[in-house]
């Protein structure tokens, strides 16, 4: 074989090997790049999934906050109504107490009048047998009437105080619920802001 032909063939082989080596290197680099791109793509997909979960969580929290705010508004309205009822009942209780005091005063005066009349009647019976019992009968009837009214007022006052106690307890319960809901709303708002 011709030495120059052998030399040329050798150079061609070296050139082919260099090309093959370069191609292999480029192939490996491409594989590495593809691997990195896949990793990046997975990271991005994971980030998108996390972001979507966060958005869903925020939306759920926002809906919870809206629901709680609506409940708070209803409770505040109910609390306002109960407060107005308590004010009205308190006014009625004060009126009943005032009426009770007036009845007690009338009863005391009537009892004094009865005692005076009884004394006069005793004295008059010694002086005259023709004493008319009309005034005493009227006084006794008046006392019986006042006593009946006084008992009715006592019952009404007792009932009003029981109702007032129940409403005050309900008002305190509503205030406690409202306070708890406001704390929960503030927590959810703080979570949403972070």
Image: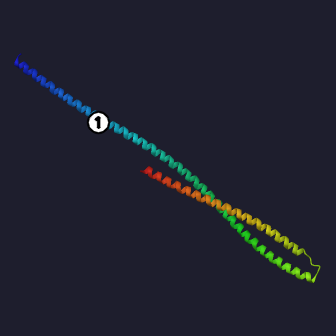
Q: Is residue 33 left or right of residue 163?
A: left
Q: Residue at x 83, y 76 (%)?
A: 114
Q: Residue at x 60, y 59 (%)?
A: 171
117 over 97 or under it: above or below: below
Q: Quadrant of residue 56?
A: top left
- Residue at the limit of the structure toward the left, as seen here: 3
Give the tally of numbered discs.
Answer: 1
Q: What residue is disc 1 on? A: 36
User: Neighbour class for label 1 at 10 Å: few (<14), some, many (≥20)?
Assistant: few
Q: Quadrant of the N terminus?
A: top left
- Residue at the limit of the structure toward the bottom, as seen here: 127
Q: Residue at x 53, y 51 (%)?
A: 69
Q: Is residue 93 left or right of residue 70?
A: right
113 over 31 or under it: above or below: below
80 over 138 or under it: above or below: above
Give the percent coordinates (x, y) of residue 188: 47, 51
Helix or strand or loop: what does disc 1 sit on?
helix
Q: Residue at x 85, y 78 (%)?
A: 118
């Amino acid at each position: 074989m011709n030495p120059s032909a052998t030399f040329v063939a050798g150079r061609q082989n070296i050139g082919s090997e260099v090309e093959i080596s370069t191609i292999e290197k480029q192939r490996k680099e491409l594989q590495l790049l593809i691997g990195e791109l896949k990793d990046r793509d997975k990271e991005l997909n994971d980030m998108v999934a996390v972001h979507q979960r966060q958005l869903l969580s925020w939306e759920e929290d926002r809906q919870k906050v809206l629901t709680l705010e609506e409940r708070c508004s209803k409770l505040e309205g109910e609390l306002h109504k109960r407060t107005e009822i308590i004010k009205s009942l308190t006014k009625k209780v004060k009126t009943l107490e005032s009426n009770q005091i007036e009845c007690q005063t009338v009863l005391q005066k009537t009892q004094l009048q009865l005692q005076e009349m009884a004394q006069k009647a005793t004295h008059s019976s010694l002086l005259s047998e023709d004493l008319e019992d009309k005034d005493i009968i009227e006084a006794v009837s008046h006392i019986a009437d006042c006593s009946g009214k006084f008992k009715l007022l006592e019952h009404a006052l007792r009932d009003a105080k029981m109702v007032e106690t129940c409403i005050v307890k309900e008002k305190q319960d509503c205030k406690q619920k409202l306070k708890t809901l406001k704390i929960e709303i503030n927590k959810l708002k703080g979570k949403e802001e972070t």
